[in-house]
Amino acid sequence: LGLLYALAGDSLKAIETFRRFIAAVPKDEANKRAQEARLEGVVVAARMASLDEAEKFLADYVKSTPQLMEQSMRAETELAIAYQKAKKPAQALSHVEVIFKAAKLFRPVTPDDRRFQSEMLGLSSDILAKLYLALDKQDEAVAVLEEMRRLSLALPSSTLYRKALTGLLNM
């Protein structure tokens, strides 16, 4: 029901519905649907710039199970983008750092996993470098892009290498 409200553009009712659904789940029970509701709560709240509400959903997600890498990264990405739009680079930075670190630690098994890791590394390193530059931290921005270049050789990924090199050249 919450997703229907979100699709209809009624974000407030969507968030309220997600909260009611989550509250109905016993606290000691691992519930996939409750986790999905938390994730969608992050997405809807972040997109409507209700950042405190999005942070609450994310905190609930992190405290609960099951947790999937893709869902965690999606939630962090949505919050990072919302903070960027709100001109709050310091808050966005913390979420992008989580994505970048998780993407580096991720051990892909399938070709889809490798593609996912490559996408997350590319997205997070690009945003991270831009945020560091926005915060006048050029050395950190260069370090991220250099690390991305090294990782691209280890994976190997010509796309990531090209992104890292382009980012370094554009500085």
Image (cartoon, grey):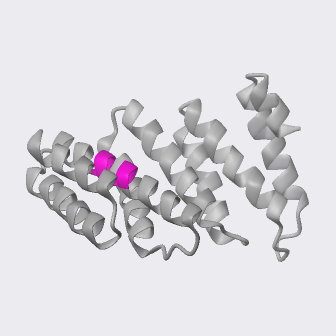
Identify the residue shown where x is 26% and y is 45%.
131
Which of the 4 quarters of the picture holds residue 158? Answer: bottom left
Q: Is residue 124 magenta?
A: yes
Q: Is residue 74 magenta?
A: no
User: For the stretch drawn in magenta, what is the main secondary structure?
Assistant: helix
From the viewer's perspective, is 30 left or right of 113?
right
Image quarter hosting the C terminus: top left
Identify the residue shown where x is 49% and y is 65%.
114
Bounds of the magenta segment: 122-128
Identify the residue shown where x is 13% and y is 51%.
137
From the viewer's perspective, is 28 left or right of 70?
right
- Above or below: residue 143 compared with residue 164: below
Residue sitting nearer the eye, 154 or 93: 154
Q: Give the x, y percent position of residue 52.
A: 55, 44
Image quarter hosting the N terminus: top right
- Whether residue 171 is visible to the viewer of this picture, yes or no, is no
Q: Give the x, y percent position of residue 39.
A: 68, 52
- Above or below: residue 98 compared with residue 128: below
Residue furthest top as drawn: 9
- The number of callouts visible is 0
Q: Give the x, y percent position of residue 27.
A: 82, 71
- Whether residue 109 is visible to the viewer of this picture, yes or no, is yes
Identify the residue shown where x is 77% and y is 27%.
7
Residue sitting nearer the eye, 94 or 116: 116
